[in-house]
Structures are given as C-alpha cells and as structure tokens.
C-alpha cells in the first residue's frame, strides 16, 4: 500500500511540476519535462517536487527546458553534497551566467571545481557558491574570469572556514567595485610593486599575482595590501585568508585545473550512494 501511495504521490508531483513549468516557459514538452523530473529525482535521491520547484526557479532565467533542467541538476547536487538550499545554489549559477556568459556546461564544470576544492581542501560549497553569487557581477566588470574566481573563493573559504559566503562575496564585490579604483589604494598597489592597471582591468588575475607576490612581503606590506584591496572592514579577515596563502592557492588552482576535476561532483554522489 505504501509503495502504491508513493507512486501516486510522485505522479501528482510530476503533473503539478509540469503545470508550474508552463507558467515560465512556452511550448513545454510534457513528457520530456516529466522524464527530466524523474531522472534527476532518481539520480540524486531527492523528491520530484524538489526537482520541479528548482527547475521552475531556474527557468525564470534559463528560458529552455534543457538549460533550466541542467541548472536545477547542478543546484540540487550542491544541496545533496553540502546542504546548500537549492534556490540559493540557483542564484549563484544565475549570477555566474549573467556576469561571465557561462554556458550550462561551463556552470557544471565550475561546480566540479568547487566540489573538488571542498573534497580536497575543505572549502565548503555552502560558502564558495554564495560568494560567487554576491561578487560575480563586480568581478566580471573589472575583467575577472570565473575560473580564477573559483580558485580565489575556494582559497579564502579553505583558509578561514569561519567566513560565510556572504562575507567573502561582499569583500570581493567591494574590492572590485570600489576599493582598487581609489587613487590612494592605487598608489599603495603601485608602491608594493604591483600593477594598478591590472587591478582594475584583470581583477582576478591581479588578486592571484598579488597573492604570489605577497609571499615575499613583510607582514606590514601584507597588511597594507589587504587594506588597500579589501578595506578596513574585511582587510583583517579576508585579506590574510588570500594574501598569506600562496601555496594553498597554487595547490587549489592546480587541482581545479586537473583532469581529476572533471566529473568530481558525480563521483562524490556515487560515493554517497554506495555508503
């Protein structure tokens, strides 16, 4: 009786989900939508309703069945692997797409990079993905790239687990949007032997170059750099979590760029299912 009841519930959730999706997308293929719900639900062991609701949220931005389901799939992986609310994960993926023009395949690859940083370095996805959501627009406006941003937020999150995704993202947003452009901070960047032009035109490359340069700075110089880039509010917390972590940044960048990163999330999910 319970099994029959479960099947009936799944059918009802599927029908409701299809009707919901029709509110945001035109020409919804009903059978294709239903099959998509069932596949993701089965693969990730989440309720059909959760899949349907997450795809509906994604479909407000990703205006095809395929792209919205692909984004929902990644968002629900984030939920399963690190308990981040699927709707919050969707917002991070939307931000990355809007800022960097990243395709759905590219978003999946970026998530694999975040996942391998969590598995190998303890950089929690519930911190790294929201930090991208908060900072992506400002970072992209200053010539940053998504791959470099994933390495940076993963380094900060691994170095200081007490920092929330909102704090990391806000620090990076403010740094890109205002901090590195002010004349006084430009002067400090120049005084430290770094490139102020790079800071406002290739923001993420600048942060990576500055981190490696800072490995040879005095403590006072590191503090000056942190203050110039992250300001008084975040310079003492976020700054050292990046600018004093050259070796960690190198290791995370190498790991995220390795063939092992491809499919990292799916492997971790398979491991969870096997337990």
Image: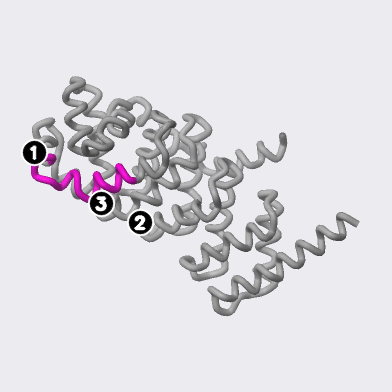
Residue 97 sits in quarter = bottom left
Display colour scheme: one colour
Residue at screen point 71% across, 70% down:
15
- Any part of residue 251 in sight: no
Seen from the viewer's position, the closer of residues 259 and 140 is 140
Image location of residue 65, percent across then percent down: 57, 68
- Marked residue nearer the N-terminal end (3 or 2): 2
Residue 100 sits in quarter = bottom left
Residue at screen point 36% across, 48% down:
146
Report if the CB atoms under discs 1 and 2 are less than 8 Å apart. Answer: no
Give the quadrant of the C terminus: top right
Seen from the viewer's position, the closer of residues 259 and 271 is 271
Task: Report helix, strand or loop for mark 2.
Answer: helix
Question: Which labelled disc corresponds to residue 143?
Answer: 3
The answer to whether 20 is drawn above or below residue 85 in the figure is below
What residue span does the magenta drawing correspond to? 170-185
Question: Which labelled disc corresponds to residue 100?
Answer: 2
Q: Is residue 11 on the magenta stretch? A: no
Question: Which labelled disc corresponds to residue 187?
Answer: 1
Q: Spatial distance from mark 3 to mark 2, Cα to Cα?
A: 10 Å
Q: Nearer the viewer, mark 1 or mark 2?
A: 1
Disc 2 residue crowd, few under 14, some 14–19, many 20+, Cα 10 Å: some
Image location of residue 60, percent across then percent down: 49, 68
- Marked residue nearer the N-terminal end (1 or 3): 3
Residue at screen point 67% across, 60% down:
49
The answer to whether 108 is drawn above or below residue 226 in the figure is below
Disc 3 residue crowd, few under 14, some 14–19, many 20+, Cα 10 Å: some
Disc 1 residue crowd, few under 14, some 14–19, many 20+, Cα 10 Å: some
């Amino acid at each position: 009786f319970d099994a029959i009841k479960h099947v009936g519930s799944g059918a009802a959730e599927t029908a409701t989900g299809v009707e919901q999706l029709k509110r945001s997308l035109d020409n919804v293929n009903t059978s294709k939508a239903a099959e998509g719900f069932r596949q993701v639900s089965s693969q990730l062991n989440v309720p059909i309703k959760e899949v349907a609701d997450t795809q509906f949220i994604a479909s407000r931005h990703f205006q095809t069945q395929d792209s919205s389901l692909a984004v929902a799939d990644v968002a629900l992986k984030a939920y399963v692997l690190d308990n981040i609310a699927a709707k919050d994960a969707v917002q991070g993926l939307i931000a990355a797409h809007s800022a960097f023009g990243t395709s759905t395949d590219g978003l999946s690859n970026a998530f694999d990079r975040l996942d391998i940083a969590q598995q190998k370095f303890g950089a929690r996805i519930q911190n790294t993905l929201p930090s991208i959501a908060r900072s992506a627009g400002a970072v992209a406006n200053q010539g940053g790239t998504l791959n470099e941003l994933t390495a940076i937020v993963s380094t900060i999150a691994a170095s200081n687990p007490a920092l929330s995704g909102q704090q990391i993202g806000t620090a990076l947003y403010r740094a890109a949007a205002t901090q590195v452009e002010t004349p006084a901070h430009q002067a400090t960047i120049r005084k430290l032997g770094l490139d102020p032009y790079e800071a406002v035109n290739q923001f993420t490359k600048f942060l990576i170059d500055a981190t490696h340069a800072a490995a040879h700075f005095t403590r006072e110089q590191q503090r000056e750099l942190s203050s110039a880039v992250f300001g008084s509010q975040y310079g003492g917390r976020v700054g050292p979590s990046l600018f004093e972590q050259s070796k960690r940044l190198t290791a995370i960048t190498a790991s995220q760029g390795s063939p092992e990163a491809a499919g990292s999330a799916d492997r971790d999910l398979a491991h969870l299912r096997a337990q």
